[in-house]
Image: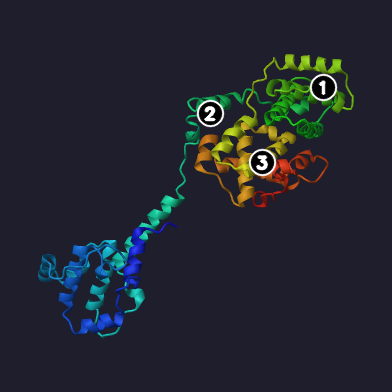
């Protein structure tokens, strides 16, 4: 907690922090043989002239008080003890009021406990000041995440908000119905999961870009939603979808012979080219579609992510790519939920800033149900037969993100 200047001054002067501070017993002894009203007036005049107590002890460079100054004489004549206590005080006058109170309550000639030295005014002002400071510390406001790219032409700061508004508008047009698998006569959700899990390993072996994987899965789902296929062609569809995604995203594209080889020569070159033509015509050559990767870039920037949060977020969202039931969520929602779950996993508590909420347009309450599902996938990641994502992210290249302990509290 930030400690203000007022808090430093008050306790130092009141509780004996200054070098010239006298013991309470000495003060009481002096007060018993002196005029309490005159003593209080002198102390008030000292505070008004110099602004500090104890001749400026602990404040180098302060001048000592002029004892016979006109201000002191005036206060002696016109100020009583009761009036001095009722005056509005500043933080530097706390010690003056303490001594006035001690002189006024000296009835039984016993020292006043240290805990009673603070006046009611002092305690109220201190509490109010600390409340304001704590509000300033924990106030969560949305920040400008593009300020650092103001001079970066590749950051397109002037257009980035419009671009993502367009992406949010277009993601609905490129989505597929989550019930499309019911229209397929020869394949099911389990076969799709096996295919995606295998393609994630192929993508890793070829060392392709992240956006290539997300576009590959998008092309597969959009094609299967419009075209009925037989079981033996499902792997061919996955290979062709990755080939098209590579042509769209990569600089160095794998050749057809490489894809035939990794399929253990289950297909011939002419079959690959024929399926490529069929897929392009079915999708009407529409390859420009916003995937979850597009939104991951923006949302990770809003979350002020480091490499650990980034790797864990991609690990979780790739787990979602394998699961057919996650198609019911829009790509932007899935990206936000993956980052939210990653933050909960790393910090052990639910954490979602106003900046993330502003740029994702999703609150933590909206993301909670999806986040629970993702945490459940994380709990079962190393079990079963579909462990391609776990093996990929259990390497030093990806920071061993798969070894992070799941956010069990989300599931519970």
Q: Residue at x 27, y 72 (%)?
A: 98
Name the residue carrying label 1: 229
Could you tell me residue 58's position as x and y percent?
32, 67
Q: Is residue 35 left or right of residue 227?
A: left
Front one among 60 and 235: 60
Q: Residue 387, image x and y in percent?
A: 79, 41
Label 3: few (<14), some (14–19) or many (≥20) C-alpha neighbours in 10 Å = some
Q: In terms of secondary structure, where does tag 3 sit?
A: helix
CA gap, disc 2 to disc 1?
Answer: 42 Å
Q: Is residue 273 above or below residue 168?
A: above
**Of labels 2 and 1, the one closer to you:** 2
Please tell me which residue is depicted at 79% across the width and 26% down the height of the picture: 238
Earlier residue among tags 2 and 3: 2
Identify which residue, 268 or 125, lies in the foreground.
268
Task: Say which label, 2 or 1, has the lower sequence index.
Answer: 2
Residue hosting label 3: 311
For marks 1 and 3 on the same chain, the one whose residue lies earlier in the sequence: 1
Q: Residues within 10 Å of mark 1 (few under 14, many from 20)?
A: some
Q: CA distance from mark 2 to mark 3?
A: 22 Å
Q: Residue furthest front?
A: 61
Q: Secondary structure at mark 2?
A: helix
Whether residue 369 is visible: no
Viewer-side label of 1, 3: 3
Does residue 237 appear anywhere in the picture?
Answer: yes
> Which residue lies under the disc numbered 2?
155
């Amino acid at each position: 907690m930030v400690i203000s200047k007022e808090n430093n001054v008050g306790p130092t002067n009141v509780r004996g922090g200054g070098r010239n501070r006298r013991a309470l017993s000495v003060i009481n002894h002096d007060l018993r043989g002196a005029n309490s009203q005159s003593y209080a007036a002198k102390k008030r005049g000292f505070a008004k002239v110099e602004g500090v107590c104890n001749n400026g002890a602990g404040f180098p460079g302060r001048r000592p008080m002029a004892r016979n100054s006109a201000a002191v004489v005036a206060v002696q004549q016109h100020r009583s003890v009761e009036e001095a206590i009722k005056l509005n005080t500043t933080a530097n006058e706390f010690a003056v009021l303490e001594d006035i109170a001690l002189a006024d309550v000296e009835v039984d000639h016993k020292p006043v406990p240290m805990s009673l030295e603070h006046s009611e005014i002092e305690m109220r002002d201190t509490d109010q000041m600390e409340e304001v400071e704590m509000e300033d510390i924990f106030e969560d406001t949305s920040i400008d995440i593009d300020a650092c790219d103001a001079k970066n032409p590749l950051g397109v700061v002037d257009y980035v908000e419009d671009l993502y508004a367009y992406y949010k508008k277009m993601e609905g047009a490129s989505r597929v119905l989550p019930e499309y698998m019911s229209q397929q006569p020869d394949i099911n959700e389990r076969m799709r999961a096996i295919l995606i899990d295998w393609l994630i390993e192929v993508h890793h072996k070829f060392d392709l870009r992240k956006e290539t994987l997300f576009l590959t899965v998008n092309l597969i789902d959009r094609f299967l939603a419009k075209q009925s296929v037989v079981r033996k062609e499902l792997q061919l569809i996955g290979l062709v979808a990755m080939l098209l995604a590579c042509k769209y995203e990569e600089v160095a594209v794998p050749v057809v012979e490489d894809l035939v080889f990794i399929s253990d020569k289950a297909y011939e070159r002419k079959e690959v080219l024929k399926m490529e033509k069929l897929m392009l015509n079915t999708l009407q050559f529409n390859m420009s579609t916003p995937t979850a990767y597009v939104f991951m870039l923006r949302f990770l920037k809003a979350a002020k992510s480091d490499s650990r949060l980034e790797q864990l977020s991609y690990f979780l969202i790739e787990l979602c790519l394998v699961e057919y039931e996650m198609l019911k969520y829009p790509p932007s929602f899935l990206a936000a939920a993956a980052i939210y779950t990653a933050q909960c996993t790393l910090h052990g508590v639910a954490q979602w800033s106003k900046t993330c909420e502003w740029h994702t347009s999703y609150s933590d309450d909206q993301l909670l149900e999806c986040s629970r599902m993702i945490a459940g996938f994380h709990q079962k990641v190393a079990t079963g037969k579909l462990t391609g994502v776990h093996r990929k992210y259990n390497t030093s290249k990806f920071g061993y993100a798969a070894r992070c302990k799941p956010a069990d509290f989300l599931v519970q």
